[in-house]
Amino acid sequence: MRMTELTDGGCRVIVVAVDKGEDAVEVVNEVAARSDVRGARVTAVGGFRRAEVGYFDRDARDYLRIPVAEQVEVLSLLGDVAESQGRPALHVHAVLGRRDGSTVGGHLLRGEVWPTLEVIISEVGGSLVKRVDPETGLALLTATGRP
Amino acid sequence: MRMTELTDGGCRVIVVAVDKGEDAVEVVNEVAARSDVRGARVTAVGGFRRAEVGYFDRDARDYLRIPVAEQVEVLSLLGDVAESQGRPALHVHAVLGRRDGSTVGGHLLRGEVWPTLEVIISEVGGSLVKRVDPETGLALLTATGRP
Amino acid sequence: MRMTELTDGGCRVIVVAVDKGEDAVEVVNEVAARSDVRGARVTAVGGFRRAEVGYFDRDARDYLRIPVAEQVEVLSLLGDVAESQGRPALHVHAVLGRRDGSTVGGHLLRGEVWPTLEVIISEVGGSLVKRVDPETGLALLTATGRP
């Protein structure tokens, strides 16, 4: 993983190149923790050699795991970084493209990068706070921003 | 709906948490009007318990309505806010993920949120103006920016 | 094509309306070159009357070309502009939506716009440099940023 921290006038923009074989979720979480990102938009494109996405099952109150056991294009990786229980927490969804152009997607659980993943993390100008929602057990954005 | 207005050096960034049962299109339009957003990028991830997307039919000069009658992940919600006939107008497209990871998408007409939709509206530094295109009847971006 | 250059406090935001019949990839590359964009996030929504997307074949070390021979919604166009061999280079992936809401996507090779494509190019605050990766022959982001 290689990263660079730039500044867009007021806010930081962190650009990350995730390398072959690294896990996208782990790397972006690690970068967010190391740089203490508390509120940001995250986007990325690239490729995975295998991945796992999730679909939130309302009854089970948990993610169904959908394995993607082939090389795919990362057509869209989109989401945010907020603060959950005092730490930066990444929440990203992904749309992946297969060899024939068909797509599969979900909440990104794991994505083994190949050959690259180009990630842009742009701060929104404050902390975004998440709190656990009792109905689902998920940490949801409160939209309480602290500049 | 809960929202917070932050500032990214020069421009505003508005973060919105759309709540269970609310319509995503209505809420974001309401936020854009209330905060007088005239030019912005919009992204979001989350979930819908049902939705309706559109495909623009060239001959009918109107959107075919595609109902999505199940809980889906909002894999990508992407678009912009511009000014159309003197008012903020939202234009967003969505890619939605089903239980098996398959996807469906279109111009977002309605999306009933469950359990959350995390929206980031980032101003672009000026007004973006739309005008009605006589051929299609659609309001299209003119890319006339007013700082 | 019509464009406007705005400023987001520190960085430029370039908004482009690509017109009917124009090729999205050509136009955005031309805008990036003309405005000397060396590091940016790119997003867009709109429609294509035909397109071609690619899937990177590991063995052939080249893109398989996937033709899309129908009017589609551009549900998501996402990527970046970096500097490759001294010039701005666009790297975008697309998710396209068909008449029935089904999707197809890949690395965007060509997209003939109809009726519009609304593109937002937001600089990240520095140059992003790409270098050719010997294993794949692709120019990959190094995440060396120069403010």
Image (cartoon, coloured by chain):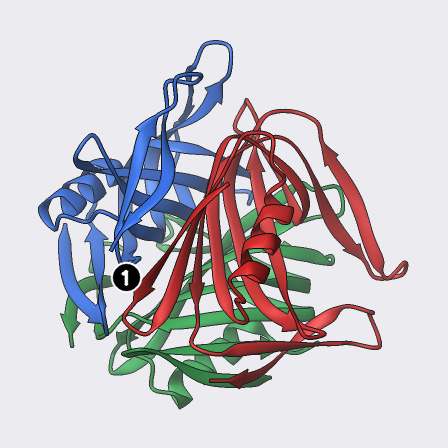
Chain colours: A green, B blue, C red
- Say left or right for B88 vs C97: left
Q: Amino acid at mark 1?
A: Gly
Q: Is residue C30 above or below residue C128?
A: above
- Identify the secondary structure beneath mark 1: loop
Q: Chain of mark 1?
A: A
Count of numbered tags: 1
Q: Does residue A58 show up?
A: no
Q: Is residue C109 above or below residue C48?
A: below
What residue do we see at 46% from left, 85% from top?
C147
Which residue reaches farthest right? C60
Residue at which label 1 appears: A137
Residue C137 in picture, x, y percent from top left: 83, 69
**Quarter of image, res A114:** bottom right
Residue A11 in picture, x, y percent from top left: 30, 77
Residue B127 in picture, x, y percent from top left: 25, 48
Residue B52 in picture, x, y percent from top left: 36, 28
